[in-house]
Image: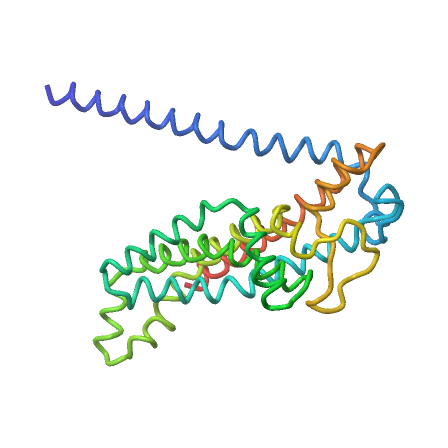
Amino acid sequence: MAKTTLNSRKISQRTAFTFLIIATVITVLPVLFIIIYTAVQGGGALSWGFISHFPSQAGKAGGILPAIVGTFYLMIGTLVFALPIGVLAGIYLTEYAKQNWLTRLINLAIVNLAGVPSIVFGLFGLSVFVLAFHFGLSLLAASLTLACQALAMVITTSREAIMAVPKEYRDGSLAIGVSRWQTIRHIVLPQAFPGIITGAVLAISRAAGETAPILVVGAAFLLPKLPQSPFDQFMALPYHLYTVAAHVPNMSKETIWGVALVLLIVVLAFDILAAVIRIKTRQRK
């Protein structure tokens, strides 16, 4: 009887393992197909001139340097505004907030914030940052708008990473007389850092591909110059890709896929950088 039960458990484990492999393959294959297909279709458009020159003839000629630089500035600006606020909010909700109706209401608001359509954030940014704060159609307004959109993900991942730190670490630090804030700063946050970075990268990767929010707060279709200050308009790869693909007649398919490939490379570069940071952090531990 015991042997039969053991065999049944082994069969169940093998079945579950097989389903896990199948699910992983189903998840990974479409991603690999998209990357490979984009590289094949757009690889011919990549050249030094395409990356380093300014656009001309409504994007049909020249390069996409302003769109690359504008996207990079936009991602950095989003990170600068969203990461500190998100991490501090995660610390408060995990380490200081009492579990009452107010905390539950805040958590519910964070969950709902993640489901708000991106165009709503764009209209919010237009009303608040462009018109109310008089930032104008600018890189600053777009960065703040995308930071608002990224906050939900940063707060959620930061909170989960902080909660994953064992309670014994906190108790041991407090037991030797270290203050609560010093414990959080020197014990909890370093342990939670890989998870926090993961959340930040996910938020930035999403921000890099957003078109609707930046459409109304400062992105320009054709701007053959680089932004000189946070109050300047800018070009961005997702909006440029949308425009050349949908609104420029007789646009070369190779050029369209080339822009898509560059956007994909930018996002993957940030993901790889975050992975390297996570690995280095774990090695130091």
Residue 285: percent from the left, percent from the top? 41, 63
User: Left or right: where does residue 241 sit relative to residue 190?
Assistant: right
Q: How many marks?
A: 0
Q: Nearer the viewer, residue 45 or 132?
A: 132
Q: Nearer the viewer, residue 176 or 73?
A: 73
User: Left or right: where does residue 70 sit relative to residue 146?
Assistant: right
Q: Quadrant of residue 142?
A: bottom right
Residue that sits furthest to the bottom in the current view: 177
Residue 256 vertical position relative to residue 270 in the rendered view, above or below: above
Q: Nearer the viewer, residue 253 or 13?
A: 253
Residue shown at the point (34%, 51%) measured from the top left: 108
Residue that sits furthest to the left in the current view: 1
Residue 72: percent from the left, percent from the top? 67, 57
User: Left or right: where does residue 240 sit relative to residue 264?
Assistant: right
Image quadrant in which the N terminus is located: top left
Residue 36: percent from the left, percent from the top? 66, 33
Residue 232: percent from the left, percent from the top? 73, 64
**Colour scheme shown:** rainbow
Residue shown at the point (48%, 67%) measured from the top left: 84
Residue shown at the point (59%, 63%) measured from the top left: 129
